Amino acid sequence: MNAGKWYADAVRIASSLGVVGGISSTEFGPDLPITRGDIAVMVVRTFSSSIQFEGSAKTFKDVPNYYAASAIAKASQTGIVSGMTTTTFQPFAKATRAQSVVMLERALRLEQTQLPDTTELITLALSATEQEIKAMSEHSYDQVSDTYATYYTGYQLSFNLTSLEDLTSALDEQTQMDIEWISKPVFSIVERSNQYAILEANGGKIKTSINAGKDISEETISLDGLYKLKKMNDNTWKIYAVLPYEG
């Protein structure tokens, strides 16, 4: 393997940790396609210290007695893999990028060795909501933007900032939006793992009033929904998705 390639360090580290092996004692085969069995092996090796592989293993009739068989069985115990059908896994089929990501995502949600503090997560979600509404009610839109940057990441951060830009573009001297609390949400934990958490918000409502000269429109908005959080590289937590309930 060429030491100057973009993936060289990643392969070296993964190899030293026992996550990946080579196609021989001296070759890695970086350009070869990866199989579904290969992915199962890497996932099980990566998470062997943070996931309890317990439960009943599925029996796949097309998995022979080869190096990946044990990993496939372990991954099936926890639902990381479920098979292409109820009885087949297709271990030698090329793994798609989507299949690889799904296996990794399932594994990440099973890590239970360093769980985040429940109170910390709930406080974060409530603070994000309270600070946003407070800044909105004071028409401090720069502060709203700062709040988004503090508490949100990824798609949700981009969505929030775009929505804020659209809102401020629509407001002028003749058009003003006021916002006030009707009731604050109560957050509860739905799911948590070492690096991901899902919170549910219930009972939160706000009232918005848009005054455009003689026209005034009011709307009551429910804040009920799911808040998805992830652990960042600096060990802080941020919200990466908000999924409002319909109706």
Image: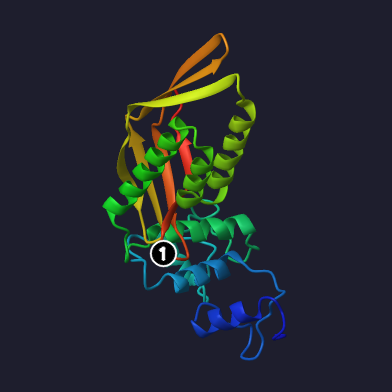
Where's residue 84, x and y in %? 55, 53
User: For this view, does 185 lie left or right of residue 99?
Assistant: left
Q: Nearer the viewer, residue 138 or 216?
A: 138
Tell me the crowding category of disc 1: few under 14, some 14 to 19, or many 20 or more residues within 10 angstroms, Cα based: few
Q: Name the residue under label 1.
A: 235
Residue projecting furthest to the bottom: 26
Residue appearing at x 46%, y 61% in the figure: 232
Give the amino acid at mark 1: Asn
Is any atom of residue 70 visible in this view?
no
Q: Which of 81 and 219 is in front in this view?
A: 219
Residue appearing at x 30%, y 53% in the figure: 120
User: For this view, does 206 lie left or right of residue 101?
Assistant: left
Q: Nearer the viewer, residue 213 or 45?
A: 213
Residue appearing at x 40%, y 31% in the figure: 223
Where's residue 57, x and y in %? 39, 61
Where's residue 135, x and y in %? 45, 37
